[in-house]
């Protein structure tokens, strides 16, 4: 194998590396896994770090439940060096014999602080209304009659109510997925229980779709078309427009890390707006277009 650089292999390989990667059914021998092991060794690949249940396929053969690690993600050492924070997540079973797999690709861990968002789906809830009234009564008007303090207390009470009641439909979806996963894997689970869990999961998906419709600001499309993916993509697109992926400095070097991008931008603007005896305001204005954006020859940015 002469391929170089970082690369990844992922999907349903329909084979296992070791006999213990199969549960139930006829026992596999170590020799039967040799060809797959030789291929992975020849390509210098290894499993990407993962979380969740790696037994990604579940089926029944002659009334016996069988589980196997058929779906996986392999990477080489160059990939691991370039994206050390990457990982695979095996989701619960949800109506298929294969579990969904999500691959997260990241250079560094960047935890972000959550922001408060008002969710009008719960505006008719009695507990929600009581939380708003409580927050409004705790706040005080300022000397000019302003209500900022009252709004601040309302926001705190709403956030506390959401933490207590677990209103996030995504959390309910995850909970139902795990329950359905356990029911699918247990050979003694009645079909009526599995059907009930699937109906509950469909209802949770409808609420999640409504949430993303509100978040995406697209009010023209009617609910019921299962377009959660569209709403989610619309929301992500707005954020992606303003996200800087890379920046090129004066020496022509491209930087990708957030701290390096910030340093290059800081140095550039520091030089641009530093005044001196020979600085002319017209020279500065000439580097800015009519929209207030830097000209391409002044600084090049690469967006997602």
Image: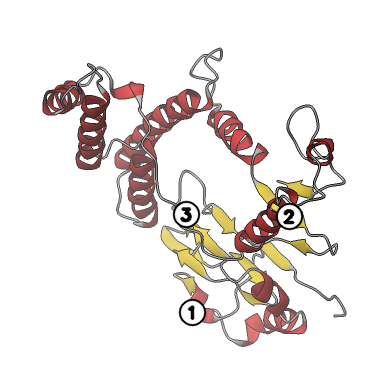
Q: Residue at x 29, y 23 (%)?
A: 122
Q: Is residue 256 above or below residue 122?
A: below
Instruction: Point out the tag, 1 or 2, that comes first from the N-terminus.
Output: 1
Between the C-alphas of marks 1 and 3, the distance is 21 Å
Where's residue 218, x and y in %? Answer: 55, 19
Instruction: Point out the tag, 1 or 3, that comes first from the N-terminus.
Output: 1
Q: Residue at x 76, y 49 (%)?
A: 302
Mark 1 or mark 3, which is nearer to you? 3
Name the quarter where the N terminus is drawn. bottom right
Q: Nearer the viewer, residue 7 or 143?
A: 143
Identify the element where label 2 is drawn: helix
Q: Is residue 74 left or right of residue 207?
A: right
Q: Which mark is residue 91?
A: 3
Q: Is residue 160 left or right of residue 247?
A: left
Q: Which mark is residue 271?
A: 2
Find residue 108 and report its image quarter.
bottom right
| Residue hosting label 1 | 20
Where's residue 82, x and y in %? Answer: 68, 71
Identify the element where label 3 is drawn: loop
């Amino acid at each position: 194998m002469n391929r170089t650089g970082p690369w990844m292999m992922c999907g349903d390989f329909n084979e296992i590396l070791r006999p213990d990667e199969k549960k139930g059914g006829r026992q596999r021998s170590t020799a039967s896994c040799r060809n797959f092991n030789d291929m992975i060794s020849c390509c210098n690949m290894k499993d990407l770090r993962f979380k969740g249940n790696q037994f990604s396929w579940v089926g029944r053969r002659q009334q016996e439940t069988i589980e196997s690690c058929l779906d996986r993600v392999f990477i080489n050492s160059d990939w691991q060096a370039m994206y050390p924070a990457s990982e695979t997540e095996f989701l619960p079973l949800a109506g298929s014999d294969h579990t969904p797999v999500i691959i997260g690709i990241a250079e560094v861990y960047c935890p972000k602080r959550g922001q408060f968002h008002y969710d009008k789906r719960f505006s008719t809830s009695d507990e929600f209304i009581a939380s708003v009234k409580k927050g409004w009564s705790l706040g005080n008007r300022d000397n000019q009659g302003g209500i900022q303090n009252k709004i601040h207390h309302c926001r705190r009470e709403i956030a506390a109510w959401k933490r207590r009641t677990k209103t996030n439909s995504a959390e309910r979806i995850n909970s139902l997925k795990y329950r359905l996963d356990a029911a699918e894997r247990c050979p003694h689970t009645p079909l009526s229980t599995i059907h009930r869990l699937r109906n509950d999961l469909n209802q949770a998906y409808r609420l999640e779709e409504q949430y993303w419709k509100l978040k995406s600001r697209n009010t023209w499309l009617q609910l019921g078309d299962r377009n959660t993916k569209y709403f989610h993509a619309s929301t992500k697109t707005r954020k992606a427009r303003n996200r800087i992926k890379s920046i090129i400095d004066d020496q022509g070097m491209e930087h990708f890390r957030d701290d390096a991008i910030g340093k290059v931008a800081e140095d550039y603007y520091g030089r641009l707006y530093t005044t001196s005896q020979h600085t002319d305001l017209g020279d500065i204005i000439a580097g800015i277009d009519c929209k207030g954006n830097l000209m391409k020859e002044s600084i090049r940015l690469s967006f997602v």
